[in-house]
Image (cartoon, rainbow, N blue to C red):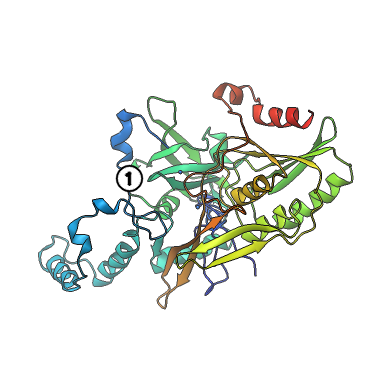
């Protein structure tokens, strides 16, 4: 059974452990294939002082795995035993005194369940009411209309993880790392990824306006995007000058494993002197696919370890033949490389079989699980974190490249790619 790496999943359902992705907006109309797909989905920034009020306080009560942080700052009331009578006191008060006391009991009930999960202070743990869960399942079935971007939460702020190449978000000028301040005028403060996805996705031909803040800018900017059918080529490849094979992987989707295998065989037939694996703006996808891909360089060795709260762990080893063993390899990464991408990049870096070029990756190192409940609702919880072969946890930190190379706005305007150019330069040394 294949597991996806995205923010949602469940062994009670076929989509359990999508733990290696970020969040999805496929906005695609669907879910973060990684963004929700890798582990989840679809699994991180400083802001100018003048905008600090917009982004709010970034401190949280735990680290996303149930471990309490800053214990010396915990309020006294949190050290007391639970008194469920308080719940019923609030319930009765709301029913009796609230100006909206005619709110149906069932709505209050589901609101309380959502509050339980949100109190974990983990952006990837979410309660889905029956309607939200139904929409999520519909997304997984392949509704691919939206803006073509993946979103996540980093430092308590909704951000663009990756605009998908050739799709509306990228064409509108949206970049990885852009902070989403408003969606159609609605503030994103306190908004979950799933709520944002629900607002941003939509039918082809309709529009959505995002208010964004970009590091280095002074003011926010509003960008109107017309939704469309989203197209994704998960694997493309070509031969560069000096017999260098360049393979671009944009997602770890259902078809990625087969397409990558085909690309590898075609590239090897050209007897390349080196390989460049481009994982930039790749938000993740299926865990099995990440393990399979890493195996082309790592023969039978551990690729990733999932560590649970009870200290139990699962070790996943490479299964495919290391066809690129001994072939010089460069891996391109950036702020939009998340989850499954980070698993592959981290493993190849740990075993020193590839050199990473670009910018630090997103930092999505947790695993989510979705459990469907009897009424059709569901709970998505972070159940583990994943570690590289050397035991590195990259959650919220990301993976630093061996060679850091930035891409400026001037580079983008001129259609230059200094990261790829540097990789080719290093390959030719």
Residue 95 visible in the current orientation: yes
**Quadrant in which residue 49 is drawn:** top left
- Foreground pick, 406 / 394: 394
Q: Residue at x 76, y 57 (%)?
A: 299
The crowd level at tag 1 (other Cα within 10 Å; few <14, some 14-19, many 20+) is: some
Q: Quadrant of the C terminus?
A: top right
Q: Is 242 situated left or right of 295 in this image? A: right
Q: Residue at x 25, y 52 (%)?
A: 72
- Foreground pick, 74 / 42: 74
Q: Which residue is mark 1?
A: 189
Q: Residue furthest left?
A: 97
Q: Is 85 situated left or right of 268 in this image? A: left
Q: Secondary structure at mark 1?
A: loop
- Foreground pick, 81 / 32: 81
Above or below — where is 247 with respect to 39? above
Residue 417 visible in the current orientation: no
**Quadrant in which residue 171 is drawn:** top right
């Amino acid at each position: 059974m294949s597991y996806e790496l995205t923010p949602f999943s469940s062994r009670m359902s076929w989509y359990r452990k999508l733990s290696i992705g970020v969040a999805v907006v496929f906005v695609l109309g669907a879910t973060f294939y990684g963004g929700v797909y890798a582990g989840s989905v679809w699994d991180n920034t400083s802001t100018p002082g003048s905008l600090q009020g917009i982004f709010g306080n970034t401190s949280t009560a735990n680290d996303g795995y149930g471990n309490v942080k800053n214990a010396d700052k915990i309020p006294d009331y949190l050290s007391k035993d639970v008194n469920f009578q308080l719940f019923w006191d609030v319930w009765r008060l709301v029913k009796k005194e609230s100006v909206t006391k005619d709110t149906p009991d069932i709505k209050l009930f589901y609101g309380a369940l959502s509050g339980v999960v949100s109190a974990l202070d983990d952006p990837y743990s979410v309660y889905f009411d029956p309607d939200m869960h139904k929409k999520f399942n519909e997304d997984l079935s392949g509704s691919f209309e939206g803006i073509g971007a993946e979103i996540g939460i980093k430092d308590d702020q909704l951000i663009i993880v990756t605009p998908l190449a050739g799709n509306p978000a990228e064409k509108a000028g949206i970049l990885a790392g852009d902070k989403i301040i408003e969606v159609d005028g609605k503030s994103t403060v306190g908004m979950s990824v799933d709520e944002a996805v629900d607002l941003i996705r939509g039918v082809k031909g309709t529009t959505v306006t995002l208010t964004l803040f970009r590091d280095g800018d002074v003011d926010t900017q509003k960008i109107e995007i017309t939704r469309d059918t989203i197209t994704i080529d998960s694997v493309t490849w070509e031969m560069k000058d000096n017999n260098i094979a360049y393979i671009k992987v944009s997602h770890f989707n259902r078809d990625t494993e087969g397409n990558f295998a085909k690309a590898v065989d075609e590239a090897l037939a050209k007897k390349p002197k080196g390989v460049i694996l481009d994982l930039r703006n790749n938000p993740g996808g299926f865990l099995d696919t990440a393990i399979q891909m890493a195996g082309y360089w790592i023969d039978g060795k551990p690729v990733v370890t999932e560590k649970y709260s009870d200290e139990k762990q699962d070790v996943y080893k490479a299964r495919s033949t290391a066809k690129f063993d001994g072939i010089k390899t460069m891996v391109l990464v950036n702020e939009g490389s998340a989850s499954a991408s980070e698993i592959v990049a981290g493993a190849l870096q740990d075993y020193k079989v590839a050199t990473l070029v670009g910018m630090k990756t997103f930092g999505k190192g947790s695993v989510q699980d979705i459990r469907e409940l009897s009424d059709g609702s569901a709970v998505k919880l972070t159940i583990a974190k994943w570690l590289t072969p050397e035991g590195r946890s990259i959650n919220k930190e990301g993976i630093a490249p061996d060679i850091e190379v930035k891409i400026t706005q001037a580079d983008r305007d001129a259609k230059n790619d200094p990261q790829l150019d540097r990789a080719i330069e290093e390959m030719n040394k």
